[in-house]
């Protein structure tokens, strides 16, 4: 697939944005259970967060659609608003997007366990992801980002759903945990197992996000680089979460995160962004440090 993003990563690291949820909490939306509703209820807030990330140096901002698949929305009785919520999210990100930058359509987990461990049929999960991807693609995203997948089977259902929805650049990112024996998903799948299966299913790029801090993802990046010659995206958390008086925050500083980001890039990551706890300050620090070489 010929694509501007694939050409950029041949020459320099591509910078993604940081956490949307963290920014919403900073804006006082701590108790909000369904952030995707803000695409309709408080569009200026969502657009401003995207603008802050672009201004910090992000090449790609990810839509506020992490929980936007029909199966995920049904828990809050919002499945009938799926198209409107996802369509609005793309519009808001596109409004904030400067020339030469990109919008990624975000797809997160369905919130369901697939059979036989749960009650969700793989074909129903795939159909749910297909419906969301179709709206995101029609809305005008530049790529689709499947992220925070703890199960390879669900990630594959998402990839297949996106591929059915349209011909678009596709990135699939898994969530791994670090053990004494290496890195594994919650379901016990290895880095090489996930990478091979995702690429065979049609993912153009792979990666890892969430759960791990920036230091731990350095070694994870090395494993991913050994498993594929395609572009890799790494989006660590800002250290470990700390809860005080009912408020959760992250102790890592932007400078510390950026120092690790340089090592992550050296370990083989073509694309770097932030997950939980990161803000525009983190992305700016990464941008400046990587620019210094």
Image (cartoon, rainbow, N blue to C red):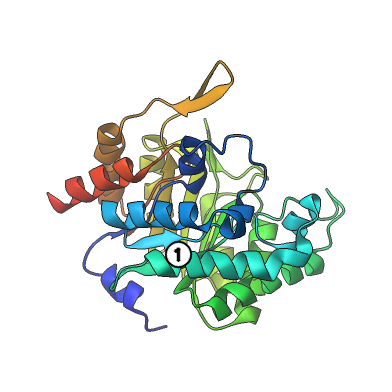
Q: Is residue 160 left or right of residue 140?
A: right
Q: Residue drawn at (39%, 25%), measured in percent from left and top?
A: 251
Write down the residue under mark 1: 93
Q: Quadrant of residue 121?
A: bottom right
Q: Residue drawn at (38%, 64%), measured in percent from left and top?
A: 96
Of the pair 237 and 284, the residue shown nearer to us: 284
* Residue 241 visible in image: no
Q: Is residue 45 left or right of residue 186?
A: left
Q: Position of residue 272 (x, y in %)?
A: 35, 53
Q: Position of residue 172 (x, y in %)?
A: 53, 62
On-image quarter of the N terminus: bottom left
Q: Is residue 230 above or below residue 25?
A: below
Of the pair 190 and 122, the residue shown nearer to us: 122
Q: Is residue 151 left or right of residue 167?
A: right
Q: Is residue 240 left or right of residue 59?
A: right
Q: Position of residue 24 (x, y in %)?
A: 50, 43
Of the pair 3 and 282, the residue shown nearer to us: 282
Q: Is residue 1 above or below residue 269?
A: below
Callout 1 secondary element = helix
* Residue 259 visible in image: yes
Q: Position of residue 29 (x, y in %)?
A: 56, 39
Q: Residue furthest left?
A: 292
Q: Residue drawn at (28%, 55%), measured in percent from left and top?
A: 55
Q: Is residue 232 above or below residue 84?
A: above
């Amino acid at each position: 697939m010929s694509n501007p993003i694939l050409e950029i990563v041949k020459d320099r690291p591509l910078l993604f944005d940081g956490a949307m949820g963290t920014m919403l909490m900073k804006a006082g939306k701590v108790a909000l259970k369904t952030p995707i509703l803000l695409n309709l209820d408080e569009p200026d807030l969502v657009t401003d967060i995207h603008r802050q990330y672009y201004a910090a140096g992000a090449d790609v901002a990810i839509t506020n659609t992490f929980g936007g698949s029909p199966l995920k929305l049904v828990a809050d009785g919002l499945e009938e608003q799926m198209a409107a919520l996802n369509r609005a999210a793309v519009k808001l990100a596109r409004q904030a997007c400067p020339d030469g930058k990109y919008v990624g359509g975000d797809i997160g987990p369905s919130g369901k366990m697939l059979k036989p461990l749960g009650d969700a049929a793989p074909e129903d999960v795939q159909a749910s992801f297909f419906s969301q991807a179709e709206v995101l693609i029609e809305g005008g995203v530049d790529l689709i980002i499947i992220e925070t997948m703890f199960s390879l089977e669900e990630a594959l259902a998402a990839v297949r759903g996106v591929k059915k929805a349209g011909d678009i650049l596709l990135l699939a990112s898994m969530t791994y945990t670090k053990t004494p024996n290496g890195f594994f998903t919650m379901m016990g799948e290895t880095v090489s197992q996930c990478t091979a299966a995702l690429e065979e299913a049609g993912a153009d790029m792979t990666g890892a996000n969430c759960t791990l801090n920036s230091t731990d993802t350095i070694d994870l990046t090395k494993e991913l680089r050994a498993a594929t010659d395609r572009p890799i995206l790494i989006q660590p958390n800002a250290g470990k979460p700390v809860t005080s008086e009912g408020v959760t925050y992250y102790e890592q500083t932007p400078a510390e995160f950026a120092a690790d980001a340089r090592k992550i890039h050296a370990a083989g990551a073509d694309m770097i962004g932030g997950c939980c706890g990161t803000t525009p300050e983190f992305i700016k620090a990464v941008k400046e440090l990587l620019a210094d070489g």
